[in-house]
Amino acid sequence: MSERKVLTKYYPPDFDPSKITRTRGPKNAGPKLMTVRLMAPFSMKCTHCGEFIYKGRKFNARKETTDEKYYNIAIFRFYIRCTRCSGEITFKTDPKNMDYESERGAKRNFEPWREAKLNEETEEERLDRIEREDAERDAMKELETKVLDAKTEMAIADALDEIRSRNARMEKTDREGVTTVAKPDAASEDRKRQEEEDAEAARRAFGSLGMPDISEEVIEEDMVDAPIAMPVVTTFVKKPKEKKDFGAALGIKKKAPAPAPAPQVKAPAPPSKLSTMLVAGYDSDND
């Protein structure tokens, strides 16, 4: 601690202050370097000694500004050294994928989430796929429309051929002077015959069942005046459940209730003298 507070310093005998001049050195023409403190952005394996360096490990790194750019975003390169063999490891930023890219000295470990993200389609690929699907969908729709049109044309052609053949047959019979009646279609005859058979089967099935007689009942005048016998309705009376004496079962004797005191009957008060005189006066015949 004493060396920090010295007031006098040692000057050698051949010291000449005039020889000390302030000079400017040449500027560094290479890439700009600066020392920074950072953490490993991804887990990696050193290619020199096989040491694993996990994500988040702190390093004193050299930061270099490269001439590469991505949409006017500068790309930086970082130099670190392996914690075991001091081998130099280099990685740089990747603004396109918002990540870091390992250059040399180490191999990045497998990260499933990163592989899945890289396998995802970009916006341009997604637009191309949508356009391709739309084109295929339109082609299928066009093909379906063509098939429906072809079926409609075939049905119309069949109907026209049938009409032509019938007209030709009728013209031939008219020339020969024979009146013909148009024959019914075989399909309609089969349908009519099937309906008749179904109706006959239903008639036989329902006719074999005995239908109940629901004719009206004749009510006579004597039956109207006759009293109506009311059915006997059974009533139930709820009987209170007797309580069991659990104390007697356990041998506990209850105290006999004390006799109730006899009610005291008050004797009537004797009549007063005034009331006696009044009653005697009313009972006399002189009044």
Image: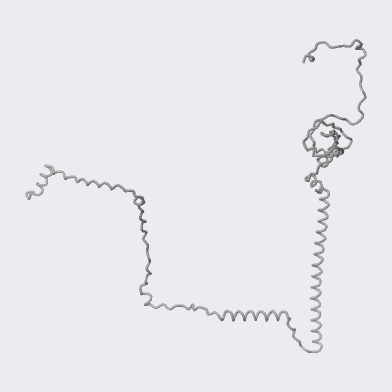
- Against 32, residue 141 (above or below) is below
Specify the quadrant of the image occupied by residue 92. top right
Q: Is residue 238 left or right of residue 118?
A: left
- Against 284, residue 27 (above or below) is above
- Against 9, residue 25 (above or below) is below
| Residue pictured at 50% horizontal, 78% vertical | 212
| Residue pictured at 30% horizontal, 47% vertical | 255
Question: What percent of the width, then of the height, locates residue 78?
Answer: 84, 34
Question: What percent of the width, then of the height, locates residue 202?
Answer: 60, 79
Specify the quadrant of the image occupied by residue 133. bottom right
Colouring rule applied to residues = one colour
| Furthest-left residue in this view | 286
Q: Is residue 6 left or right of residue 215?
A: right
Question: What percent of the width, then of the height, locates residue 80?
Answer: 84, 33
| Furthest-bottom residue in this view | 177
Q: Is residue 176 left or right of residue 203?
A: right
| Residue pictured at 87% horizontal, 30% vertical | 33
Q: Is residue 87 left or right of residue 190?
A: right
Question: What percent of the width, then of the height, locates residue 239?
Answer: 36, 58
The one nearer the camera, 206 or 90, is 90
- Against 37, residue 245 (above or below) is below
